[in-house]
Image (cartoon, rainbow, N blue to C red):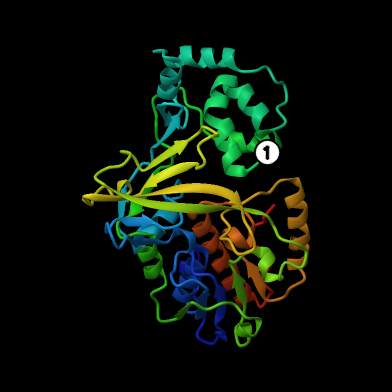
Amino acid sequence: MASGTTLSASAELKPVLIVGAGFAGAVLARSLADAGLPSTVIDARSHVAGNCHTERDPVTDVLTHVYGPHIFHTDAAEVWAYVTRFADFMPYEHRVRTTVGTRVYSLPIDLLTINQFYGTAMRPDEARAFIAAEADPIPAPANFEEQARSTVGVRLYEAFFKGYTQKQWGRSPKELPASVFNRLPLRFRYDGRYFSHRFQGIPREGYSRLVERILEHPLIDLRLRTSFAREAATGHGHVFWSGPLDEYFDFRLGRLPYRTLDFEHFRAEGDYQGCPVMNYADPDVPYTRITEHKHFAYWEDHPQTICTQEHSRAAGPTDIPYYPVRLANEKALLRDYLSLAGTVDGVTFIGRLGTYRYIDMDQCIAEALTTASTYLDALKAERSMPAFVQSPL
């Protein structure tokens, strides 16, 4: 870890330029600063924390996840120790509900969901045998739909996955790889937790305050509302880019496609839906889910509430990118950009956007710590820094 690495007093400490004040950029900057290396961190937005940004709603005073809900979860003890160094985390286990037709179910699919859906009271072994009999006998599932049908059967697939997936990705589940479905848990026990990691929680004061504290160091020069210009790299020892990979190259090979989200906020008195997140699986419901933000901060008391509907669509040139598509054509374009990045000296691409991957917060932090260590080691050995510390493929 970079926090255990320091540079000698005689080393030439040229500051680095870090583009982006999300977790990737902030953790990298702090790790380098703790080792004695200064940095300039710039971000075009008016706030830190990127899409994890949280702020108080001016009407309800509810702490709001501005760009969609974020729950911190990890099995990495060192990452948990890192974030709890900068913030007081409240225990929180995420539980999602989904509306199908006129009924509400627990998600992900567990023994409760199965018994709810089929109107049964099966025990684990009975449910396992029942679902096995429901499943389609597809020997080598080639896509999301075939994998789902071969795992849970047609009825559960069409109720919970088909419509939601179509809305989220804007294409038929037959066009998505089978691996996408394999990331979704199926439990034959009563366990409604969305994540099963050892460490789970939400920072009491929100993610933006957490990132602000990470960046509070005399060797970190934070500049918000500042867009990247190539001449800004002058005088810096290295550039770490956490923006979109294709944007760094002015999209010269074409745009890497993303899904983006449109948010519709509304307020109400009391408690609107009784849970933090309600998914809507039916294809005729235009949004994918509704977030009720005050349920994330259960330790607070608010008489009013603010909720957010999410609508997924293809990202345009001016939209905020959220989910990389990463199908066959997109991966081919990604490989071309990786080859191009390999020809650039003095730049390393980091984070979710810089590596065109969807990674969780804990992964982003762990990779930023590794990147800092790699850079400090490169400085000491007087060798060049690679364009990618973690392979995007």
309 sits left or right of 131 in the view = left
Q: Position of residue 380 (x, y in %)?
A: 60, 76
Q: Does residue 36 sit above or below 371 in this rendering?
A: below
The residue drawn where x is 46% and y is 32% is 108
68 sits left or right of 384 in the view = left
Question: Residue 283 sits in which quadrant?
Answer: top right
* Closer-to-camera residue (374/389): 389
Q: How crowded is mark 1: few (under 14 residues within 10 Å), some or many (20 or more)?
A: many
Q: Position of residue 203 (x, y in %)?
A: 34, 56
Total count of labels: 1
Q: Where is residue 179 in the image (x, y as percent from the top left)?
A: 64, 37
The residue drawn where x is 52% and y is 12% is 130
The residue drawn where x is 21% and y is 50% is 303
What amino acid type should be assigned to the residue bearing mark 1? Leu
The answer to whether residue 183 shows anywhere in this view is no
Q: Mark 1 points at which residue?
A: 176
The answer to whether residue 31 shows anywhere in this view is yes
* Secondary structure category for the residue under label 1: loop
Q: Where is residue 270 in the image (x, y as percent from the top left)?
A: 24, 45
